[in-house]
Image: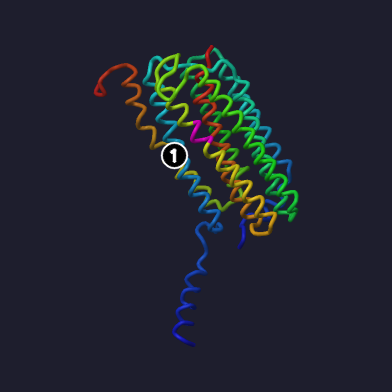
Amino acid sequence: MSQADLTMEGHSTGLTVGPAFSIPTKKLAMWLFIIADTMTFAACLVAYGFLRNGTPNWPRPFHGITNVALMTFVLLTSSLTMLNGLRSARAGDKAGAFRWTMITAAAGIAFALLHVREWLGLIDEGMTLFKNPWGTGLFGASFFSITGLHLTHVTAGVIALIVVGVRYKGGRYNADDIEILGLYWHFVDVVWMFVVPLVYLLNLAH
Amino acid sequence: MTTTTANEHKSNGIGKDLGVYLCLLALAGLQFVIAYQNIDASQMFWRMLTVACVEAALAALFFMHLWTEKRSFLWFVAIFAVGVLLGMQYGWTDAFRMLVGAPFSK
């Protein structure tokens, strides 16, 4: 046995140690990203709460809940379609998994379009990053920052859904990749569950 | 070891996912109902936050399959996330101080 063989053997012995928590490495990496991203969103929402609580003339510009309710419904439903995609992938139904993944991407696009429509409506009413007709200018900065960060995540998720879906169909990715992408997509959904009450519902004009 | 929970995923029918989805829809609807209740902003905030936490827990446990992972991993995620979230609450005292315009020492 050569020195090289001994070295390789040594390395392989080291690599046989199981991954942390007995979770596949890619999946653990996604969970760590999700935990880190949770901190990002939590910091934004806590900073938003800090500003809202400390500013007496905080605007309440939202007159209806139709749009935000529709956005919530679309995003929650997209989580269910993502689960259907994973179930199909686990069952070896490639066509089904691809179809459900693309339906999830379409729901993400619908959510993004509804979001943009809402933004344009607020901009039409005179809201910018630094001023608005209703009260403190801080509202625009915090609203666009938080919802913009979430919209960025949705957009990235849609792109990832399309890429992973196509590569899964082509045989380059497997069901594990669909599952890992699903974790990200559900996380985007979880974040929205906090954005809706804190940013929208607490600022309804009564 | 491609996945530790593959068998659990296969055995899970659509029924449980659909049930959790309907619960999440109902809870989201509850948040909208709370928004139109005639209560002060503080009560509204706490009620909505409680509902949002329940929603997030349901989604993490069942949609993200945290429930079927190793218990040690579940505890790792829970303790780490909750610890960080709690740690971020230090700023509230200062926010209230700004609101009432009182020095921090008072």
Q: Nearer the viewer, residue B66 or B99?
A: B99
The number of callouts visible is 1
Q: Is residue A66 magenta?
A: no
State which quarter of the image contains the C terminus of chain B: top left
Q: Residues within 10 Å of mark 1 (few under 14, many from 20)?
A: few
With respect to residue A189, does A17 lie above or below?
below
Image coordinates of residue A48 in percent, x first then y, are: 42, 27
Q: Nearer the viewer, residue A93 or A50?
A: A93
Q: Residue at x 68, y 49 (%)?
A: A86
Q: Residue at x 49, y 82 (%)?
A: A5
With respect to residue A22, does A70 lie above or below?
above
Q: Which residue is mark 1?
A: A40
Q: Is residue A149 magenta?
A: yes
Amino acid on which disc 1 is placed:
Thr
Image coordinates of residue B64 in percent, x first then y, are: 60, 45
Q: Which is the main secondary structure of the residues drawn in magenta? A: helix
Q: Residue at x 66, y 43 (%)?
A: A82
Callout 1 secondary element: helix
Q: Nearer the viewer, residue A124 or A39?
A: A124
Image coordinates of residue A41 in percent, x first then y, are: 46, 36
Left or right: A133 in relation to A83:
left
With respect to residue A67, does B39 lie above or below?
above
With respect to residue A37, does A63 lie above or below?
above
Left or right: A61 in relation to A164:
left
The segment highlighted magenta reads A147-151
